[in-house]
Amino acid sequence: MEYRPHGVCSQLIRVELDGDIVKNVEFVGGCNGNTKGICSLIRGMNVHDVISRLEGITCGYKSTSCPDQLAYALKKAIGQ
């Protein structure tokens, strides 16, 4: 599944799930090291746990962040 984030530097988030488990996530754009780190840390985690940890995180003066947008992408992927 692909998600176009809003209000952040990344332009696209690709999400691959295996049931409720995060199989793979890839960001296009954004802070390369940070987004790679997020993807590595959440691989193999339950999607609901990832959403609860990342939802609501902000970036500087922005009302959202790449992790927050990932939570939105994951919600979309599971139909929430």
Image (tube, rainbow, N blue to C red):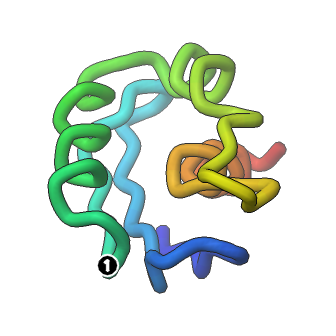
**In the displayed structure, does residue 49 sit left or right of residue 76?**
left
The kind of residue on which mark 1 rests is Val
Left/right of residue 19 with respect to residue 53 in the rendered view:
left
> Would you name the residue on which mark 1 appears?
28
> Which residue of the protein is positioned furthest toward the front in this rendering?
61
Residue drawn at 29 percent across, 53 percent down: 35
Query: In the image, what residue occupies the spot 70% across and 52% down?
Result: 72
Residues 79 and 31: in front is 31
What secondary structure is found at the residue carrying circle 1? strand
* Residue occupying the point 52% across, 56% down: 66
Is residue 78 in sight in this rendering? no
The one of 65 and 78 positioned closer to us in this rendering: 65
Residue 61 seen anywhere in this rendered image of the structure = yes
User: How many residues crowd mark 1 within 10 Å: few (<14), some (14–19), many (20+)?
Assistant: some
Could you say where residue 60 lies in the image, as x and y percent from the top left? 63, 52
Q: Is residue 26 above or below residue 47?
A: below
Viewer-closest of 50 and 67:
67
Question: From the viewer's perspective, is 53 left or right of 24?
Answer: right
